Amino acid sequence: MLKLLIVYYSQTGNTEKMARAIEEGAKSVVGIDVDVKYFVRPEELAEADAIIFGMPTYYHDIGMDMKNLLEGASKEEINLKGKVGAAFGSYGWSGEAPNMLLEIMKNRFQMDVMEPALRIKYNPDKNGLEECRKLGKTVAEKILKTSLT
């Protein structure tokens, strides 16, 4: 079974709501094992067929937990090349973190990223949660399609 890993950090709960809706969308695709985690070790990233990172924007930046994870993966030379990836997050005023995650995934780890990043201002509403479900389903379908080729 193909594995989709959703790794997120959430201080206010908004990004967590997004992660759970993404999980819901991904689980609608048969043949995909979805794992949602608040914390992972760098080597766990290599075990996934696709990774979706969720991070709210704090002071125009990515939070330290996510930075430490990505730096650890880089130092340990975790191979993520070609894996499907996506990013999401909530924000209050600027919203750079999800885009920064995509840049790191694409440029440092050479992942096959889905653009643009999903960004939702403040608390995700009904429409925002539906966008999250679509993202989860789209990533799950992509890794399923990729595995068949």
Image: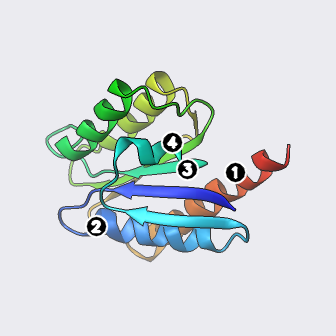
Q: How far, Cα to Cα, is label 4 from label 2?
A: 27 Å
Query: Few, some or many C-alpha atoms within 10 Å of disc 1 (few <14, some 14-19, many ≥20)?
Result: some
Residues 21 and 148: in front is: 148
Relative to 2, is 34 on the left or the right? left
* Residue for badge 1: 143
Q: Evaluate whether residue 117 shows in this view.
A: no
- Above or below residue 103? Residue 50 is below
Tell me the kind of residue under disc 2: Asn
Residue 96 picture location, percent across and down: 30, 39
Please give the residue where the numbered disc 3 appears in the rendered image: 48
Q: Nearer the viewer, mark 2 or mark 1?
A: 1
Q: State the residue position of label 4.
A: 46
Residue 90, numbered label: none
Residue to which mark 2 is pinned: 14
User: In what element is the residue under mark 2?
Assistant: helix
Q: How far is mark 4 from mark 3, CA to CA?
A: 6 Å
Q: How far apart are labels 1 and 3 at the CA level?
A: 10 Å
Question: How many other residues sit within 10 Å of disc 3, few (<14), some (14-19) or many (≥20)?
Answer: some
> Counting other residues with Cα less than 10 Å from the Cα at mark 2, is it few (<14), some (14-19), or many (20 or more)?
many
Residues at discs 4 and 3 in contact (Cβ within 8 Å): yes
Whole-Å distance between the Cαs marked 4 and 1? 15 Å
Tag in front: 1 or 3: 3
Q: Residue furthest left?
A: 59
Left or right: residue 115 versus residue 59 is: right
Q: Residue at x 32, y 62 (%)?
A: 15
Secondary structure state at the residue bearing disc 1: helix
The amino acid sitting under disc 3 is: Ala
Dot 4 falls on a residue whose secondary structure is helix
> Which circle's residue, 3 or 2, is located before the other in the chain?
2
